[in-house]
Image: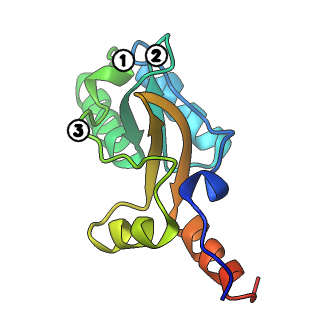
Amino acid sequence: MSALRHVADHMAREIVTLRPGQEINSALHVLLRHRVSGAPVVDEAGMLVGILTEKDCLRAALEASYYRDWGKCVEAYMTQELITVDPGLDILAACQRFLDGPVRRFPVVDAGQLVGMISRTDILRALAESWGQA
C-alpha cells in the first residue's frame, strides 16, 4: 500500500458555483445543464456562503408552483450551515467524515475560500490508487 495523500491531491478544482443573489430559476438550470446535484454558493470574494442542492431546488419549484412565481434568489433556499474539509486533511480522515454522515461531497475550504470539492467517489479512487488497483 503506497502512502495516502491529502484531500488537495484528489479534490475537483474546477467546479460549478452559484452566487447568493442569482435567481433560483437560473441556478436550477445551471445544475441541470452541468448535471450536478448541488453547487457551492460563493460571494464576490470567493468565500463560501452556502450550498444549493437539488432538494433545495425542489422546495423552490414547489413554492413557485404554488405562488406561480420563481421570484426568490439562491440565498433564500441555500443551506448555510455547512460541513467543510481542509485541503490538508488526509484521505483516511476524509473517508471517516463521509462515514459519519449523509453528505455525498464536501466543499474544500482554505481560510474561508472555496478551493475545491471532494466526493465519496474521489475518496474511493484515492484509496484504490493507494492499493495499486486503479
Mark 3 or 1: in front is: 3
- In the rendered image, residue 103, in percent from the top left (x then y), is placed at 35, 60
Question: What's the distance in space between the residues labelled 3 and 1, CA to CA?
Answer: 18 Å
- In the rendered image, residue 23, in percent from the top left (x then y), is placed at 44, 17
The amino acid beneath tag 2 is Gln
- Residue matched to label 3: 81
Residue contact at pointers 2 and 1, CB within 8 angstroms: yes
Q: Secondary structure at mark 3?
A: loop
Question: Of 130 and 12, which appears nearest the observer?
Answer: 130
Task: Specify few, some or many for label 3: CA neighbours under 10 Å numbering under 14, 14-19, or 20 or more.
Answer: few
Q: Which mark is residue 22?
A: 2
Quadrant where the N terminus is found in the figure = bottom right
Dot 3 or dot 2, earlier in sequence: 2
- In the rendered image, residue 5, in percent from the top left (x then y), is placed at 61, 65
Q: Secondary structure at mark 1?
A: loop
The amino acid beneath tag 1 is Cys
Quadrant where the C terminus is found in the figure = bottom right
Task: Specify few, some or many for label 2: CA neighbours under 10 Å numbering under 14, 14-19, or 20 or more.
Answer: some
Note whether 76 is above or below 120 in the view shown: above
User: Who's the residue at 51% across and 68% down the image?
Assistant: 91
User: How many numbered discs sit on the rendered protein?
Assistant: 3
User: Who's the residue at 50% across and 28% down the image?
Assistant: 27
- Residue matched to label 1: 73
